[in-house]
Image (cartoon, rainbow, N blue to C red):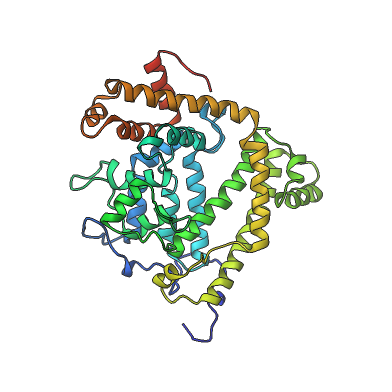
């Protein structure tokens, strides 16, 4: 790289096909490897192999029936954890290409970032955290790490998926450094193979985190409009999204809802991505990191939105919180869902014989609470409701 060429100037237009990696990318040749040494593939990089392991995992398939905002009976159009993860992965891969980072690693982290979520979305996580507070609580990132290092049973030689250090780092730290005390599963694994919790992760993990933010805000607007939780008029007056909604109406007049949503989301998402690329390019020009290790050594994130865009995005999230996540229809459903999680946990801990035999046997090895926590966290929405009906002989309608 010429010494006098600003790093941001290397971030040219996105073009089809593989792009040469920038010096600050996470190069496969510098990977710290896997906890259990394996012979690597002759046809796939270690990060693309990680991606394939995640896609073929049980935990990834279960995301199909785990709530994003709406539970399954609301309709099969709305996003689930699986479709959300796929949208995040698409954005992460596109951003990684334009920033000349490793596309496979960014996509892998994006696909894995929600593996640890409970049934019923954040409401389910809150309920499971509350009922397990006396045994360490529950954190979905920590549970995702536990899934890929312990609970997945696909290989004869080891538990988990034996992912590379860089993928594990991104899974755990994609939202930034973790201040002590770390959740139990993360602290326990870090003692065996440190993930350097106090440092920022590589640029691909940072890309995945922002792709997550951009994806969920845009698709929640889409789902919220289709579910009639708020109106086109409401979104025209919302922060950040409002000018885009008004511009679509001014240009096309009254549109079929799906066309209106498509046009508005297209321009809103482009504005966020363009801002991210510009701000990240400026930060790269200033920091000029020469390696992935130099990225990790910085005291701040390299991948970011500009200050004004961050403020507007925060205001839009507040709008969605008020009009969507706190909507009476959503709250009523999630309140009942939390009762399902709480009642199941208490019933299984009180009588572990209610668990499937293989899970019940595990309770004798270290107490029922942790086993039951893992069992419930792995449930889909539909399975949780079926277990509730089996245990209590009573179906509950969300």
Residue 16 appears in the figure:
no
The residue that appears at 42% across and 23% down in the rendered structure is: 343
Residue closer to the observer: 256 or 205: 205
Q: Is residue 355 positioned above or below 20 on the image?
A: above
Name the one closer to the observer, 141 or 89. 141
Instruction: Check the image and name the residue furthest to the top.
Output: 393
- Residue 188, horizontal then vertical, whole percent: 30, 50
Closer to the camera, 346 or 5? 346
x then y, percent, for residue 25: 43, 69
Which residue occupies the extreme left position in the image? 157
Q: Quick one: 110 or 119, which is closer to the camera?
A: 119
- The percent coordinates of residue 133 (x first, y second) are 41, 36
Q: Does residue 213 appear left or right of residue 52 in this picture? A: right
Determine the residue positioned at 26% across, 29% down. Answer: 359
Left or right position of 38 against 345: left
Residue 128 shows in the view: yes
Q: How many marks?
A: 0
Residue visible at 43% across and 62% down in the picture: 201
Q: Viewed as shown, does residue 33 lie left or right of 60? A: left
Q: Is residue 74 above or below residue 246?
A: above
Coordinates of residue 148 in the picture (x, y in percent): 32, 47
Name the residue at 30% across, 24% down: 355
- Left-right relation of 272 to 95: right
């Amino acid at each position: 790289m010429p010494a006098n060429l600003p790093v941001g100037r290397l971030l040219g237009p996105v073009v089809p096909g593989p792009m040469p990696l920038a010096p600050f990318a996470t190069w496969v040749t510098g990977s710290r490897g896997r906890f259990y040494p394996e012979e690597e593939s002759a046809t796939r990089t270690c990060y693309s192999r990680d991606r394939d392991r995640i896609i073929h995992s049980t935990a990834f398939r279960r995301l199909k029936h785990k709530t994003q905002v709406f539970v399954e009976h609301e309709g099969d159009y709305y996003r689930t954890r699986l479709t959300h993860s796929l949208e995040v992965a698409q954005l992460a891969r596109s951003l990684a290409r334009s920033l000349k980072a490793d596309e496979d690693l960014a996509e892998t982290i994006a696909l894995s970032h929600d593996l640890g979520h409970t049934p019923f979305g954040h409401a389910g996580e809150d309920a499971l955290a509350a009922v397990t507070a006396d045994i360490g609580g529950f954190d979905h990132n920590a549970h995702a790490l536990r899934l890929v290092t312990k609970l997945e049973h696909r290989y004869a030689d080891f538990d988990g998926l034996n992912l590379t250090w860089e993928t594990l780092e991104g899974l755990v730290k994609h939202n930034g450094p973790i201040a002590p005390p770390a959740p139990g599963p993360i602290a326990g694994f870090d003692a065996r193979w440190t993930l350097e919790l106090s440092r920022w992760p590589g640029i691909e993990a940072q890309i995945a985190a922002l792709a997550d933010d951009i994806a969920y805000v845009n698709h929640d607007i889409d789902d919220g409009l289709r579910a009639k939780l708020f109106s086109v008029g409401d979104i025209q007056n919302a922060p950040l999204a409002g000018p885009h909604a008004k511009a679509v109406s001014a240009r096309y007049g009254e549109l079929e809802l799906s066309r209106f949503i498509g046009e508005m989301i297209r321009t809103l998402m482009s504005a966020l991505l363009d801002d991210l690329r510009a701000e990240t390019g400026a930060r790269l020009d200033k920091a000029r990191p020469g390696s992935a290790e130099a990225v990790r050594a910085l005291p701040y994130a390299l991948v970011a939105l500009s200050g004004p865009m961050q403020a507007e995005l925060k205001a839009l999230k507040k709008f969605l919180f008020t009009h969507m996540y706190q909507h009476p229809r959503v709250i009523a459903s999630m309140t009942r869902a939390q009762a399902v999680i709480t009642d199941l946990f208490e019933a299984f801990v009180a009588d572990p014989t209610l668990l499937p035999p293989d899970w019940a046997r595990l309770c004798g090895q270290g107490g029922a609470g942790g086993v039951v926590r893992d069992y419930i966290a792995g449930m889909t929405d539909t399975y949780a409701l079926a277990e509730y009906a089996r245990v209590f002989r009573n179906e509950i309608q969300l």
